[in-house]
Each structure stands twice: as structure tokens, then as C-alpha cells.
Image (cartoon, rainbow, N blue to C red):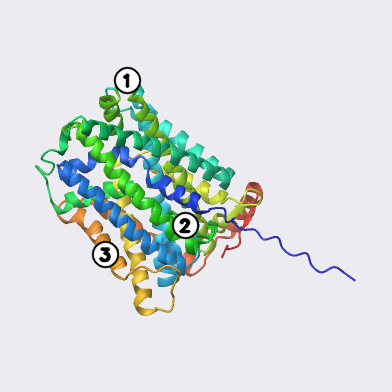
Amino acid sequence: SRAGPKPRTRHALKRELGLLRAVSLVIGTMIGSGIFISPQYIVQEVRSPGASLVIWAVGGLVALLAALSFAELGTIIRESGGEFIYVLRIYGKLPAFFVAFTFLVVVKPMGGAASSLSFAKYVLAPLYPECPPPDVPLKCTAVVVLLLVAIVNILSVHLSMSIQVFFVVAKLVGLLVIVFGGFVTLANGHVGSLQNAFEGTVLGVSDIGIALYQGLWCYAGWYNLNYVTEELKRPEVNLPRALLIAIPTVTVLYLLVNVSYLTAMTPRELMSSTAVAVTWGNKVLGSWGWLMSIAAALSAFGSLNGSFFSGGRLCFVAAREGHMPDILAMAHVHRLTPLPALTFKTVLALVVLIPGDFESIINYFSFTAWFFYGITVSGLLYLKIKKPEMRGSYKTPIFVPILVIIAAVFLVLAPIIDQPKIEYLYVTLFILSGSIIYVPFIHYKLCPGFLDKVTMFLQLFLEVAPADKNL
């Protein structure tokens, strides 16, 4: 008898992330360069050490509440893609396209550019002890690290996650050194800036909003597991569990690190420092202060690696749902990594990197991101009220998404209430310009004839093929 047709080999991303790697991914992307740089920007806005510590605590709470809301969404809609896939399934194609367009073209490239700039800043800090590094070597170093991280993620999921675990350990050691140094300083009776901690506090709405932007940048990464749900083992258990381990750990560490900074540095020293951790290291560790440059650089590298791993999946899922070119929904036939999506993310990050500076990048990143985080969490509130039968294995109290939505509204409006900047209008107009792409190419599915040939050429050249869903 004739043999039946040979079954098709399943081509999909593998479930390789257990609880340890999931926690490492969240901690590794959250603890990046921000804790070594952002303290100075927060103090600049609120003008007192005590108020800056409150900002750090509030930022951790907001990140935790938002992450728990995303965790419930992730157990209801068990697909990779984070905000994009949740908005698509709840609100439909047009809102989801704006999410994909904004995150892929604005938010994710800005995050990658900021992390690579931070890495470069700390790598070069020992070479320029008296001044900030010049722009050319700074940008060149950032470009090199971006390309290196992209190559690692293209080569292997296992390699990327093994590197992530290593860098999580390295950055935790660096932060614990700072915490220990703070305890020693306090034990010797030096309270530094913690005496009269709230003196001179400024509580303007815009000041608080921008300070929270800088603080929440340091917690960016709480959402990354939702981008890789299809690669997570037992997501219904490990998704909320990893977040409940990672985010409180990071929040406590951040508070202790900032206390350590404030025991050794005056607010004026902190605000004028070009690299806070290095300044702290020189004052507390003396001749060993250069170790802080290494710790900060390793931290930025680990965060960049984690954001590449998760951010590439967003592009991959958006293309798989027809919101991006088909080639971006393909995975390498041997390595099972989303090579085209990772390459696309790398190119956009390089474009953002060239003209950008760290503080501006963070402000526009946060303004844009929290607008869509609020929309996404409003979807969870809608499901809880209108479709209670759609329940996941993890359930948050209804006040959690309500608080997140209130926080998101404040974060979007606060910086433009009494200190409006034209750049926020430009970002908004750029987001809305996505409709020019959506109407012909997504809604009406118009496709230039040459695009199929380009896709086929790239598919053969890159050795990639469409990947199945991992549900």
C-alpha cells in the first residue's frame, strides 16, 4: 500500500523559559542603566532626597500593579505579543495597529537606544573622568553594543537567556555592593542628605510627572514576559509568579541603593554628576571606584539583551497577525529565532540612536508607552465588567486595573499641564500618522506586486519560514 503523506514538521518558537529564566528576564530588563543614571534626574525635578525616595517607591508600586494586570491578561489571552495582542483581541484591528506601530517605531527603538547610550557612557567614563564622553565615541560604542546584542539574540534563544542569567547575577552583585557601602556609611554615623530629607521639595504637577517618567524608566521591563508567553513553560503559573518575585525584589533594591547614594552624596553632587554610580564609587570605594563603571555597563548590557529578546517577539507577532510585512513573522528554520524581526528592531534602534540624547529619549518613551499601557489595562477592566466568563487562571482585584488607569492618565497629562513642550505634540502626530499606512495596506490589504518577490528572496536568503503559534 502507498504510504500516506508525510506529516508537516511543526515550525514554532520553543517553550524554553522556566521560572528561573522568567525571573531573570524580568529582573534583567528592569535593572538596567536607569538606577545608575536616573537618580540625578529625579532629584533635579523634586529637589529633595526624601521626595526622590517617595518617587522610587511609587514607581515600584505602579509597575507592580500594572504587571499584575498584564499577568491576568496573559492568562486569559495566552499568546505572545503583549499590549498588541491584548488590544487586538479586545478592541480590534485599528487600535491594535496603533499599538504595534507606536511600540515598534517609537517605544522599543527608543528603549534600545537609551540602554546602549547608557552602556557606552559607563564604558567610557574611566577614560573621561573630568567631563562627559564626547558624542562621537559615545555613539560609536553604543552602535557596537547594539549590533553585538542583536547577533546574540539572532544566534540562539538558549545563548541569549544564559547570558541574561549571568548578567542578572553580575548586576545584583554590583547593586549589593552599593547597598552594603550605604549600610557601612550609616553605621559610621554619616546620614548625609537623609538629614532634613524633605527640605526644598518641589511638588509641581509636571515636576512629579517627569520625575515619575525617570523612575518608571528604571522599572521598564515589568511587561516583557507578556511578549514571550508562547515561549514560557506553564505560563498560567509562571507568569504571575515570576512577576511577584521580580518586581518587589527590584523595588526594595532600588530604594536601598538610593539611600546609599544619598548617604554619600549631597543633592548638589548628585544632580551635577554625569554618572551617579561612578561618583558614589569614587567617594566610597576610593581607588576601586572604577568597579562601578563596569557594574553599570554590565547592567545596561543585560537590560538591552532582555529588551531585544522580548521586543523582537512583538514585531514577530504583529507581522503574524497581518499588521507588519510577512517576512517579519518568520523564524530561522534551524535556530528558531525571529531573525527578520530582530534585524528590523536593530535598524530602527540605530536610527533613533544617532540624533538622540538620554533624557529626551526617556521622556518621550514614557509619555508614549504609558498612554498605551492605560488603554491595554482598560481592556482588562472591560473584560472584568462585560465578560466575566473570560477568566484566566490568575485574577487581580478590580481596584488594581482602576489604579493603573488613573496612574496612566496622570503620567500622560502631567508633563504637559504646566510645562507643555512641542515635542509631545510631534510624538502624538507621528503616532496618528500610522493611519496613512493602516488604511491602504492593513484595512484594504493593498500590496505592491514586487513585495511578494522581495519576501521570497529574503526568505531564501535568510533561511526563514512562517512559524506556528505556540498555544
413 lies above or below 261: below
- Residue 70 placement: quadrant: bottom left
Residue 126: percent from left, percent from top: 35, 23
Badge 3 crowding class, 10 Å Cα cut-off, few under 14, some 14 to 19, many 20 or more, is some
Residue drawn at x 34%, y 49% is 219
Q: Is residue 103 left or right of residue 47?
A: right
Q: Amino acid at mark 3?
A: Leu
Residue 311: percent from left, percent from top: 46, 51
Q: In the picture, which quadrant includes the C terminus?
A: bottom right
> Is residue 436 something that shows in the picture?
no
166 lies above or below 322: above
Q: Amino acid at mark 1?
A: Ser
Residue at which label 3 appears: 403
User: Which label belongs to residue 287?
Assistant: 1
Helix, strand or loop at label 3? It is helix
Residue 278: percent from left, percent from top: 30, 29
Point out the tag, 3 or 2, that comes first from the N-terminus: 2
Residue at which label 2 appears: 227
Q: Amino acid at mark 2?
A: Tyr
Residue 209: percent from left, percent from top: 21, 52
Q: Nearer the viewer, mark 3 or mark 1?
A: 1
